[in-house]
Image (cartoon, rainbow, N blue to C red):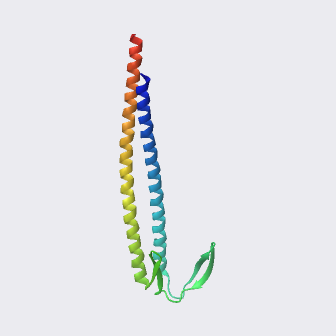
Amino acid sequence: MMGGGGGGGGQMQQVAQEIEQMEQEIDAIDEEIERLREKKSDIDEAIEAIKVLESGSTVQVPVGGDAYIRATIDDIDEVVVSLGGGYSAEREQDGAIDTLGTKQETLDDHIGELQEEKAEVETEMEELEQQAQQMQQQQMQQMMQQQQEQDDE
């Protein structure tokens, strides 16, 4: 009689492991979304800086190791923008802003895709949780029936 309950317990354990994996997947998606939002925020700051800086402005330029040097901008119309894949291009001020805006749109698209993926995993996880709850109720009913049968004897 106890063997039937053990099989259900194994199935419950499997469902619990799947739920745990889904929770880890959701956490990883959340971390990736946060990383992309930080990247987008960095681009916002770059766009704002390009808009307000003028030729002759003095800025602090990072040189690594949290060290900065002061530098004077000779010509704001010569902005070097990373295009991705290790490539960069020199753009004039408006072109640099446009290129950065395109990067932001790409990040927004990726964030949207990740949010959709997260929603799908959450839905699947909710279904598994409901399944686990039903399995638990069935096990309780079986145990109650077995107890009642033993009491009747």
Residue 101 appears at what percent x and percent y? 40, 74
Q: How many marks?
A: 0
- Relative to 110, does residue 150 appear above or below in the rendering? above
- Relative to 104, does residue 80 appear above or below in the rendering? below
Horizontal side of 64 relative to 82 (left or right) equals right
Please name the residue shown 47% across and 76% down the image.
86
Residue 123 appears at what percent x and percent y? 36, 47
Work out whether residue 51 or residue 86 is closer to the camera in this orientation and state it: 86
Please name the residue shown 47% across and 55% down the image.
28
Residue 146 appears at what percent x and percent y? 40, 19
Please name the residue shown 47% across and 52% down the image.
27
Quadrant occupied by the N terminus: top left
Horizontal side of 102 relative to 57 (left or right) equals left
Please name the residue shown 58% across and 79% down the image.
61
Quadrant occupied by the C terminus: top left
Quarter of the figure with residue 66: bottom right
Quarter of the figure with residue 29: bottom left
Q: Residue furthest front?
A: 3
Residue 92 appears at what percent x and percent y? 43, 86
